[in-house]
């Protein structure tokens, strides 16, 4: 049995450590002045290879945070590296500062870089580094925890810290929002993080408990997935999966284009409307999860990605007022639909072996609609609003003639050089029709400002 008293003392002493952001320049000076011991007896021999070391240098140039350093400071002010030896050797080696350690990394050239691949084959003496990048590396800071003997830290505890840290490493996930948020910070990534804090997301469609810690940005990753699917549905609808490369492209595009806040707000607004419709219909994410729960003993089930993909796309095409008016019947028919194992398999692309189902998104979305939402529409004789092509030139010509070339919102002329869109005079959410009589050509900026307001034609 574990000695809890000893553990309590250990935890108390661990809390005596101080944290700071220490630059590579400062750590280099500590090493050159003989203040820091890179290889205390309990440390591993050098295990990092040149490719991994190159990745660390790439992260520093990009400003991607690295795992913290853990140092022990004795009464004489000397430092020992408890954890982080390989990272320090990487920086000192790349900069050619390792003068008393036998290593293949001293002055090494970069290899295997995936993002800054133009730097492959280059070292610290290359012009790219001499003029700018070496200083950037030296200015890079690493979170550093220092445990000081002078402040009562028991020296033997450094072995326990070393053991614990090397049992459970947590590197940044590759191909994830967690990584892309470091590299491509933008209005778009900030928006995704804002959505992840909303109640409509956390209680409505999240795949985790609302009060649980999300240290790896899994929620943000899911939100990015849904937004990518919605914004690229015409391209993706004949596929049965969403490649992560497309999620990355979405992040990169908003980063490189420096998408302005007002456009980001429109994306956010549209997605929040879908979350709102989900809350109206299902209430909580557990209700959605229960749709595909095949174990009655499990009382709490969160939805999976394949199910949420279909639900998100389906709700994006439905009116909030329609869902509000018929939500009890809609939920009843949806729950009945998912009680059928074959229906569940089709929507989730499940089953195994030769029976595996690989329907594209469009088939799964259309199938769910036809068996649920469309049934309610047929029951009450409600016409389904059809999507309109806001760039249909023949329709534009007809509407412009009817409008005498004027925008019905701002009353100014729509010139041939202006950006314009076709939209509804009375919103579909207000049960406006898709008939030509309810359509108009507006300046793009006017249409954004108008949102769901009703416009009266003069």
Image (spheres, helix red, strand yellow):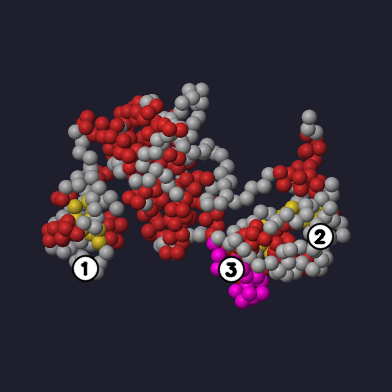
Q: CA distance from mark 3 to mark 2?
A: 31 Å
Q: Residue drawn 28% across and 37% down?
A: 322
Is residue 283 in sight in this rendering? no
| Magenta-colored stretch includes residue 354 | no
- Crowding at dot 2, Cα within 10 Å, few <14 / some 14-19 / many 20+, comes out as some
* Residue under pointer 2: 37
Which residues fall within the magenta stretch?
115-131
Q: Quadrant of residue 331?
A: top left
| Camera sees residue 91 | yes
- Measured from the top left, where is residue 402 in percent x and y? 12, 58
Q: Name the quadrant containing residue 3.
A: top right
Q: Earlier in the sequence, mark 2 or mark 1?
A: 2
- Which type of secondary structure does the marked residue at label 2 adopt? strand
Q: Which mark is residue 416?
A: 1
- Identify the residue position indicated by label 3 in the image: 119
Q: Secondary structure at mark 1?
A: loop
Tell me the quadrant of the picture where the C terminus can be found.
bottom left
Q: Is residue 415 above or below residue 37?
A: below
Alpha carbon separation for disc pair 2 and 1:
71 Å
In depth, the one of 150 and 329 nearer the eye is 329
In the displayed structure, does residue 431 sit left or right of residue 311?
A: left
Image location (x, y in percent) of residue 202: 48, 41
């Amino acid at each position: 049995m574990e000695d809890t008293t000893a553990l309590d003392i250990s935890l108390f002493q661990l809390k005596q450590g101080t944290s700071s952001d220490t630059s590579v320049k400062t750590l280099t000076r500590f090493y050159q002045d003989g203040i820091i011991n890179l290889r205390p007896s309990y440390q591993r021999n050098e295990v990092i290879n040149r490719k991994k070391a190159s990745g660390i240098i790439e992260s520093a140039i990009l400003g991607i945070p690295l795992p913290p350093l853990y140092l022990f400071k004795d009464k004489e002010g000397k430092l020992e590296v408890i954890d982080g030896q390989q990272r320090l050797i990487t920086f000192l080696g790349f900069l050619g500062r390792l003068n008393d350690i036998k290593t293949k990394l001293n002055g090494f050239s970069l290899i295997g870089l995936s993002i800054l691949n133009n730097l492959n084959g280059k070292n610290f003496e290359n012009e790219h580094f001499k003029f700018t990048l070496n200083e950037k590396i030296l200015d890079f800071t690493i979170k550093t925890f220092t445990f000081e003997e002078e402040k009562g830290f028991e020296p033997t505890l450094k072995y326990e810290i070393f053991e614990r840290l090397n049992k459970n490493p947590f590197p940044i996930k590759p191909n994830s929002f967690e990584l892309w948020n470091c590299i491509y910070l933008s209005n778009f990534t900030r928006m995704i993080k804002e959505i992840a804090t909303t109640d409509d997301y956390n209680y409505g469609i999240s795949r985790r408990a609302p009060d649980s810690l999300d240290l790896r940005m899994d929620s943000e990753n899911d939100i990015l997935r849904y937004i990518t699917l919605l914004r690229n549905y015409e391209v993706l609808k004949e596929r049965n999966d969403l490649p992560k490369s497309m999620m990355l492209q979405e992040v990169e595009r908003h980063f490189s284009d420096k998408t302005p806040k007002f456009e980001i707000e429109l994306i956010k607004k549209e997605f929040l409307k879908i979350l709102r419709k989900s809350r109206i219909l299902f209430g909580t994410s557990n209700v959605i999860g229960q749709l595909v729960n095949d174990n009655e003993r499990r009382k709490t089930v969160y939805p999976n990605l394949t199910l949420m993909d279909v639900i998100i796309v389906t709700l994006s095409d439905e009116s909030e007022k329609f869902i509000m008016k018929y939500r009890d019947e809609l939920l009843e028919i949806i729950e009945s639909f998912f009680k059928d194992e074959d229906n569940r398999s089709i929507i989730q692309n499940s089953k195994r072996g030769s029976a595996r189902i690989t329907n594209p998104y469009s088939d799964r979305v259309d199938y769910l609609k036809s068996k649920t939402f469309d049934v309610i529409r047929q029951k009450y004789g409600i016409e389904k609003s059809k999507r309109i092509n806001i760039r249909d030139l023949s329709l534009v010509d007809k509407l412009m003639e009817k409008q005498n070339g004027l925008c019905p919102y701002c009353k100014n002329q729509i010139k041939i050089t202006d950006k314009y869109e076709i939209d509804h005079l009375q919103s579909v959410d207000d049960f406006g029709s898709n008939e030509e009589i309810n359509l108009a050509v507006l300046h793009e900026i006017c249409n954004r400002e108008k949102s769901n307001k009703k416009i009266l034609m003069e």
